[in-house]
Amino acid sequence: MTTPSRSAILVTCAAGLCLAAVARADAPSGSVSASTSASVAPPASASAKPPLPALPAGHAAVKPVPSAPPPKTLPPATTAAPKKTPPSAARPTKAGARPTPGVRSPDPAARRGVAGGPTADDVALGAETPELRALYRAELEIFPPAIPPLGSPWPNELASPLSAAETLPHVHASGLPPSPPTSGPKPAEGGHDVSWLAHLQLPDLPVRWDARLVRYLEFYKDDPRGRQLFAFWMKRSGRYREAIRRSLRRKALPEDLAWLAMVESGYDPTARSPAGAAGLWQLTADTAHLYGLSTDRWADQRLNALAETEAAAEMLSDLYRRFGSWELAMAGYNMGYGAVMSVVRRYNTNDYWALSRLEAALPWETVLYVPKVVATAIVGRNLAAFGFADLVTDPPIDGDETRVAPGTSLQAVALAAGCTLKEVESLNPELRAGRTPPGPVAAMTTGSADGSYPVRVPTGKGATAQANLSKTRETVPPFERYVVKFGESLEQVAASHKVPVARITELNAIAPGEVIRGGTVLLVPRATVTAPASNPSQPAVAAATDASKAVVVVPPEAFIYPDRRRVFYRVLTGDTLPDIARNLHVEVDDLRRWNDLDPAARLQEGMTLQVFVPQGVDLSHAVLLAESDARVLVAGSDGFFAYTEGTRGRRRLVVTAKAGDTLESIGRVHGVNAASMERINGRGRKEALKEGQTVVVYVPAAPGATPAGTPGAPGDADSWPMPAPNGPLPPAPEARLLPDLP
C-alpha cells in the first residue's frame, strides 16, 4: 500500500473555491529534457504569480513585456518551507524605533553580541545584498509553503479530498515522480499560453521545462520587480561576465555557468554571507583553501573576481566529473557534494528533477537553486525576447598588473603609478590591510622580488608603477615579518618589540575587536639592537619572587606523570579545546580531565589551563607559563580562599553555631548580609542551625593585616612562608570565637 505524502492531504477551502496541494502540485505533469542540439517543447501549464514586494530604492523601473493574461487559479502549494530565514529578521532596527504592536522584533545586533558572533538566523542566510534579499522575499511569495497558517482547521476537520464530485479536486499520490507526457504540450486551461517558450534560444546547460523553471522565466519577463532585479544584475554583469566566460572556455566548461555567479552574489565581488562565504562565487574559506586561495587577514583572494573564478571553475569541473550531470553538479555546489551523494543513495535516483519533487529529499533552497540558475541563463541568451535588448551593461573592469614587494602599502603603489589610492583599492579588493602580504624573511630584509604580490593599477600605468617601485626596492624596508605565537596577545607582541600597541595596530590595519591568532603574520618595526651595559655583579635576569608569580587555580584532583612536565596556558578569545590540544600535542579528553571542563561549553578569555605535555616536545611556537613561574592554588583550599578573598579586602572565618543560630543572625553579628551568607553556605538564611555546625563568614580584613597576595598573609600557610619574627602581629581574635572558660 502506498502512503500519501504530506502534500497530498492538505486542502484549503475559501469563498467556495477548494484547492488541494496535490503530491507536489507545483511539479509539472511531465518533464522533457533538452539541450542545445535538440528542440524542446514547453510545458502544458504554468503557475500564476502573486504580487511581489518592492525592490530597494535606487533601482530604475523596467517596463514589462506584454504577455498572455495570467491564469485564474492560485499558485500551487509546496511541501517544504524555505531553508533561509527571512532577511527582515536579520537587519538591524533603527535606534529608538518602536516595535510594531503584536510583532516580535528582536535586535539582531544585540543577539550577535550575546552569541559572540553570527546567530543561527544569520548563518541560514546567503550573501547579504539588497537585491538578493529582495529576490528571496519574492521567492517566499512565488513558492509559498504548504503549511497552513495558525488557526486553520486540522485535517480531520476538513472535507475529504477523495470525492467523486467533478467540481472537487482529486488527490493522487504514489510517492513517485509523474510519468513523461505521451503527447505534445498545449495551451493551459484559462488561456494561459506558454508556447512562446518553444522559440527561445537555449543555453549550453541542459534544460528541463520544470514548473519552477517556467515560474522564474515568467517572473523575469512579466513582473516589474523581477525585471528590475535582472536589469540591475545584467548591467553589473558587464564588469566580469566576459572574463568569466574566457576562464570557463579555457577549462572546456559550459560558458553559461557564468550566470551561477549572478545567482550567488548578484555579480558583487565583495558580497559576504553571515555563514562565511564571500566573493562572486560565494566560496567558504575551507573550500577556497582547497583550491589554492588565501583567506588570511592580509589577503582574502575570494574577493579577487578572477582568482575566485578560477577556483570555482575547477570546483564545478570536479563536481561534474563526480556526478556526470550539471544539475547535480550545481546542486552539489549549493549544498555540498557529500549531501547530494547521500540523497542519491537514499532515494536511489540520480535525476535531480526527480529528487526535487520527492518529499524531504533536497533542501528547499537547493530545490529552487538549479531552476533559478537555468532560468537566468535562458534570459541571458534571449535578452530581446525578455525586453532587455536595449540594456547597456557596465564596461569591463580592467587594469595593468605589476609585481609589488611584500609589505608595500597601497598608498606607495598609488604614488608610484600616479593615480589615487581609491583607484588602487577598488582594483584590489582582496587586500584587506592596505598592504601587500608580508613575504618570506629574505624578501623583507633584502627587498628582492621573491614573494612579490601581483597588484593591479589603472590601465596604462603599469609600466610607470613598475619603474618607480623598482627604485624603492633598493632601500631596505623599515619593517620586519613576525609570526605570532600560539597564545600570544597583541600586548605581548608590542612589549617584546618595545613599541606601543597602537603602532602595531596601525601598521597592520587591525580592526577593533579583531582577534589575532597564533600563526598570524604581522609587520613590526625593525628593532635596533643595542648591547646592554656589562655588570658582572648583577645577573641579567632576576629570579622571580613569590609575589611576582602568576596565580593559577587548579582542580583538587592531582595528576602525576613521570614522562611529562606541567605547563600552563592562558586562554585567549576564540580558543577552543581542539586548537589547544593540537598545538600542545595532547588529547582533548586529557585537557578536559586536567582542568575539570565541560567540552561542550566555550572557553572564556582569562582562564588558565594546566597541561601535562610530553617531555621533549617542541613548544617554541606557543606562549606558555612554566610551573616554576606560577603560584599554584588548589580550588577550595585554605590558600585559595586566603588569596581570592584577600584581593577583595576580606578574610575567611569559620564560625561554630550555637543552638538557635541562623545564617541571618550570624551574618548580622559579622556585618555580612543574609544573601551573601546564603551564597557562601548554600542553605536558607532562616534555617535553624544545630549546635556545633560550622558556618563560613567572609569578613573585612582587620586594619594593619598583611594584604593577601604578599608573603606571610594569614590563612595561607600552605602556600606562603610564615611571618618574619619582627613582622606585624596577627589580628586579634574575635571574642565570639574564643573557647568558653571552664
Image (spheres, rainbow, N blue to C red):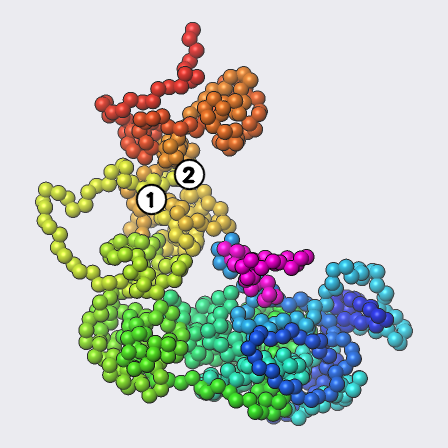
Residue 700 appearing in the image? yes
Which residue is at a point 67% across and 84% down the rendered structure image?
222
Which residue is at a point 62% across and 58% down the rendered structure image?
99
Q: State the CA–CA distance, disc 2 to disc 1.
A: 14 Å
Whether 578 is drawn above or below 556: the answer is: below
Q: Reading the chain from its start, which is encountered first: label 2 or label 1?
A: 2
Which residue is at a point 29% across and 51% down the rendered structure image?
616
Task: Determine the main secondary structure of the stretch shown in magenta.
Answer: loop
* Residue 135 sits in quarter: bottom right
In the picture of the structure, the residue carrying the numbered disc 1 is 566
Q: Which amino acid does label 1 sit on?
A: Arg
* Residue that sits furthest to the right in the current view: 165
- Image marks 2 and 1: residues in contact by CB distance under 8 Å: no
Task: Give yes or no for residue 92 being in the magenta stretch.
Answer: yes
Front of the two marks 2 and 1: 2
* Residue 546 sits in quarter: top left
Q: Which amino acid does label 2 sit on?
A: Pro
The magenta stretch is: 86-113
Quadrant including the N terminus? bottom right
In the picture of the structure, the residue carrying the numbered disc 2 is 555
Dot 2 falls on a residue whose secondary structure is: loop
